[in-house]
């Protein structure tokens, strides 16, 4: 299991705590510190398209209109913290930490 997120993200911290409590040992990729490898970025975009970008974030709000108009891949390469997170890579990709994702990994 690979976990793409941010150390400073409350949702990511909650998700990691729950996953570990359920017996998972995810490999954590902090997109700010570790970056977002191109192969992983391509898979994420193939799975989620434009929804891979968190348009509710402070980073998004600080972008110029020209930056907001960039292709998703270019935007996420330039600003990896815009990734809607967490993205969990385990038997396919999931995004976010809503009930459906929690159910898949926690059995709740």
Image (tube, rainbow, N blue to C red):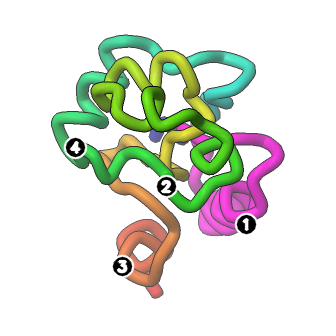
> Mark 4 Cα within 10 Å, few/some/many (few <14, many 20+)?
few
Task: Specify start and end residues of the magenta stretch as a single range.
Answer: 4-26
**Which is nearer the N-term, disc 2 or disc 3?**
2
Task: Point out the frontmost of discs 2 and 1.
Answer: 2
User: Is 7 in front, or is 55?
Assistant: 55
Q: Position of residue 64 (x, y in %)?
A: 56, 34
Q: Secondary structure at mark 4?
A: helix
User: Is 14 in front, or is 84?
Assistant: 84
What distance separates the C-alpha of mark 3 from that of mark 4? 19 Å
Q: Which residue is mark 1?
A: 14
Q: Position of residue 54 (x, y in %)?
A: 49, 52
Q: Can I make out residue 92 in this image?
A: no
Q: Position of residue 93 (x, y in %)?
A: 30, 47
Q: Which residue is found at the position 54% from the left and 38% from the top?
A: 4
**Which is nearer the N-term, disc 3 or disc 4?**
4
Q: Which residue is found at the position 50% from the left and 20% from the top?
A: 36
**Which is nearer the N-term, disc 4 or disc 2?**
4
> Mark 3 Cα within 10 Å, few/some/many (few <14, many 20+)?
few
Q: Can I make out residue 60 in this image?
A: yes
Q: Which residue is mark 3?
A: 100
**Which is nearer the N-term, disc 1 or disc 4?**
1
Task: Point out the frontmost of discs 1 and 4.
Answer: 4
Occupied quadrant, residue 22: bottom right
Occupied quadrant, residue 107: bottom left
Task: Point out the frontmost of discs 4 and 2.
Answer: 2
Q: In the image, 18: left or right of 69?
A: right
What distance separates the C-alpha of mark 3 from that of mark 1? 15 Å
Q: Which residue is mark 4?
A: 49
Q: In the image, 87: left or right of 51?
A: right
In the rendered structure, are the residues bearing label 2 and label 1 in contact, judged by CB atoms less than 8 Å apart?
A: no
């Amino acid at each position: 299991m690979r976990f793409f997120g941010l150390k400073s993200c409350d949702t990511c911290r909650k998700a990691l705590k729950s996953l570990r409590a359920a017996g998972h040992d995810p490999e954590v990729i902090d997109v700010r510190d570790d970056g977002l490898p191109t192969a992983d970025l391509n898979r994420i975009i193939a799975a989620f398209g434009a929804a891979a970008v968190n348009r509710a974030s402070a980073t998004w709000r600080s972008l110029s209109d020209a930056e907001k108009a960039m292709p998703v891949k270019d935007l996420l390469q330039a600003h990896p913290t815009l990734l809607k997170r967490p993205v969990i890579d385990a038997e396919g990709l999931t995004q976010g930490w809503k009930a459906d994702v929690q159910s898949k990994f926690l059995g709740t």
